[in-house]
């Protein structure tokens, strides 16, 4: 039988990884932050914009965020700045050890607190999961029997100090009917073979490896190369919408430029976001703050300069090609 994305969907909805941590040390670190202001949970939507704060008592404290901004409670998205530790990490040495122990590139890291009596309605976190290039891990810090996570209709009561993967691209919800807050350390990270090796054997043996979007490391460009990639191009709006795949449509393209901004290549979209470009080899660029799921290939050195915008899900790659105009010398 041919491996397919359906076999990803057939994997267990969650798996406990082969690392565990000291629950008392986790709790002590979180206690150090009890007097800090925890912000309301937010998300990133089309055009890399932030949603309004959630209206329920579901609060976050960012330990790692875009630009290291301590006020960012969203998981981040394409932009100018990469992920960095926030000042709060200096108050949590054991949590810093936990993060260092993970063999993967870290994206956002948040402490997320759900108050007693609160329910998070059923929803999906997209795009996340093995085919997209990053996963969401949980380390429970404080919980109670009434704190229940449901993924794909399967109920979970994860215990403090354990490390869990959940496929949050599936429908899931959380409810806390207990009398104390539920606090989890929520870690977004890229996928590496070393991280996947921490999954249980029965899970690993069923993963179609060609469908896993492993993260490619940055291949930094030399300063003298930056000018070679400057160009003007029309950008398809679908590549800026994080739930859309690259496909031709009647929607008008947006004028855009690839410029050298303070030693970094940036895709500057008219009427849209500015996104730093991270070179991963051979003229392929992923969007800063994003993953293998979408990016840009610049082929500017032949008779027909072109820009190829692409999206990826597992081994399926869709792309849109646009003619690129080189700057006048």
Image (cartoon, rainbow, N blue to C red):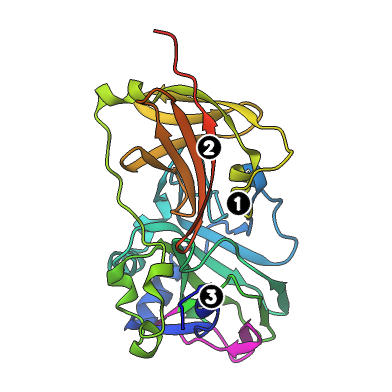
Residue 53 shows in this picture? yes
**Magenta span contains residue 57:** no
Return the residue at label 1: 242
Which residue is depicted at the point 41% across and 76% down?
A: 208
Mark 3 vs 2, N-terminal side: 3
Residue 9 location (% of width, % of height): 55, 78
Residue 157 location (% of width, % of height): 55, 89
Number of the front mark, 3 or 2: 2
Residue 205 location (% of width, % of height): 36, 85
Locate residue 94 relative to residue 180 in the image: left or right: left
Mark 1 vs 3, N-terminal side: 3
CA gap between label 3 and label 2 equals 32 Å
Return the residue at label 3: 167
Residue 187 shows in this picture? no
Which residue is depicted at the point 34% across and 58% down?
A: 105
Number of the front mark, 1 or 2: 2
Q: Secondary structure at mark 3?
A: loop
Return the residue at label 2: 321
- Within the image, what quadrant is residue 272 found in? top right
Q: Secondary structure at mark 2?
A: strand
| Residue bounds of the magenta highlight | 143-164
Q: Is residue 100 above or below residue 51?
A: below
Q: Dot 1 surroundings within 10 Å: few (below 14), some, or many (20 or more)?
A: many
- Give the quarter of the figure containing the C terminus: top left
Which residue is depicted at the point 34% across and 23% down?
A: 228
């Amino acid at each position: 039988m041919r491996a397919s994305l359906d076999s990803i969907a057939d994997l267990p909805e969650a798996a406990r990884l082969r690392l565990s941590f000291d629950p008392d040390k986790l709790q002590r670190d979180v206690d150090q932050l009890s007097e800090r202001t925890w912000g309301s949970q937010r998300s990133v939507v089309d055009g890399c914009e932030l949603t309004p704060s959630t209206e329920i008592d579901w609060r976050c404290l960012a330990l790692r965020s875009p630009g290291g901004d301590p006020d960012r409670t969203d998981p981040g998205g394409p932009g100018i700045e990469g992920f960095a530790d926030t000042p709060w990490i200096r108050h949590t040495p054991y949590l810093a050890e936990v993060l260092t122990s993970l063999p993967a590139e870290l994206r956002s890291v948040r402490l997320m607190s759900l108050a007693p009596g609160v329910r998070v309605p059923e929803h999906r976190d997209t795009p996340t999961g093995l085919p997209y290039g990053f996963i969401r891990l949980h380390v429970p810090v404080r919980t109670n029997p009434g704190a229940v996570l449901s993924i794909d209709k399967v109920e979970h009561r994860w215990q403090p100090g354990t490390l869990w993967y959940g496929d949050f691209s599936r429908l899931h919800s959380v409810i806390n009917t207990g009398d104390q807050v539920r606090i989890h350390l929520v870690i977004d990270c890229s996928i590496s073979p070393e991280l996947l090796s921490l999954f249980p054997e029965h899970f690993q043996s069923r993963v179609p490896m060609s469908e896993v979007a492993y993260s490619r490391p940055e291949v930094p460009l030399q300063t003298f190369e930056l000018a070679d990639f400057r160009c003007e191009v029309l950008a398809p709006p679908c590549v800026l919408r994080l739930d859309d795949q690259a496909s031709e449509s009647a929607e008008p393209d947006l004028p855009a430029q690839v410029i050298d901004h303070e030693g970094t290549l940036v895709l500057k979209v008219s009427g849209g976001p500015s996104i730093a470009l991270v070179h991963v080899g051979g003229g392929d660029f992923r969007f800063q703050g994003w993953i293998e799921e979408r990016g840009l290939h610049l082929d500017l050195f032949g008779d027909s300069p072109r820009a190829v915008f692409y999206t990826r899900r597992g081994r399926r790659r869709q792309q849109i090609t646009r003619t690129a105009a080189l700057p006048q010398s």
